[in-house]
Image (cartoon, rainbow, N blue to C red):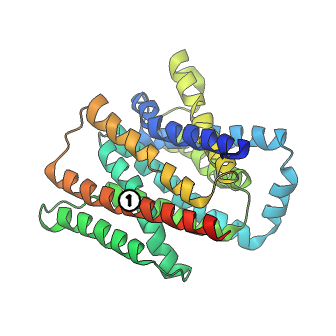
Amino acid sequence: MISSQQREGAIYALTAYGLWGFMPIYFKQMGFISGEGLLAHRIIWSCLVTLIFILFWRRIPLIIRAIKNKNIMLTLCISSLIVGGNWLIFIWAVQHNHMLDASLGYYINPIINIALGMIFLGERLRRMQWIAVILAFTGVMIQVVAFKQIPIVAISLALSFSIYGLIRKKAQVDAQVGLFIETLILLGPAVIYLEVFSSDALAFTEYSSGQMLLLLLAGPVTSIPLMLFTAASQRLNYSTMGFLQYIAPSIMFLCAVFLYKEPLKASQLITFGFIWVALFMLSFEAILKSRQSAKTA
């Protein structure tokens, strides 16, 4: 029987992944500003919105504790650069009609997580995981060798997000506090970029009321899904979260093909096919392992 805590977790997870999946629609409306300018605004308003939630939940002591820890701050300095790069690549992909590549990147992401866990955390792969990794690698290599197309955007998104997750795993800091410090680190460069080096304005007087609203939404669009994801991860087991994470790239894929009419090339379809089979195997294996653990318990 499903507990109320699991039900809440499922609602939080579905909402978080749904928001992430539909996020490209938001970025598609931002053609009035460059990708770099949008990234700068996203950093500024995410920092402000995250600070509001931190004040509401009285987590200032956690921020002070993290800032005093040199190892945590060094880790967050590195992770802030990586997540900033990931955000910029994603914005560029959406604004330049590469949403399918973005979708592929986030499909590949869990498989790269498994590979990084093996390489850097000493985790041992089970047979099904090995097969999934090999299938995913084969799908990408077919696109590279047979069709002479390197899915740079997809690989960049998957690698950057996986490396970011690996680094944040070692940081030992609350997710929301970590996001605030990361955006705080990037805040100065973001403001300087808008004021000195960019034709995009920081002052709202340069934009229409509709454009102002869209820019302000960059904060909650970034922060709210992460908070929902954190709440879900505290209520659901790992295998359930792993299965639900495919919702976001699936929504992106459907939006790209049916809403924005991006052409689905044969090379992409073959790669997607290999990735989907690999992800099905991972999900099936995770469900079996979860049931075995439940029986043992």
Residue at 39% in and 30% down:
31
Res 284 quadrant in image = bottom left
Query: Can residue 69 be spotted in the picture?
Result: yes
Residue 249 at what x, y percent from top left?
A: 40, 46
* Residue behind mark 1: 279
Q: Where residue 53 appears, x then y in whole percent? A: 76, 39
Q: Foreground residue, 132 or 107?
A: 132
Residue 222 picture location, percent across and down: 58, 41
Image quarter where the C terminus lies is bottom right
Number of numbered discs overlaid on the protein picture = 1
The answer to whether residue 195 of the structure is visible from this angle is no
- Viewer-closest of 68 and 137: 137
Q: Is mark 1 on a helix, strand or loop?
A: helix
Query: Looking at the picture, which amino acid does disc 1 mark?
Result: Leu
Question: Where in the figure is residue 215, as x and y percent of width and height?
Answer: 55, 29
Q: Nearer the viewer, residue 262 or 77?
A: 262
Quarter holding residue 251? top left
Image-based side of 92 in relation to 290, left or right: left
**Quadrant of residue 93 in the image?**
top left
Give whichever of 228, 5 is nearer the camera: 5
Q: Residue at x 45, y 77 (%)?
A: 126
In the image: residue 76, left or right of residue 119: right
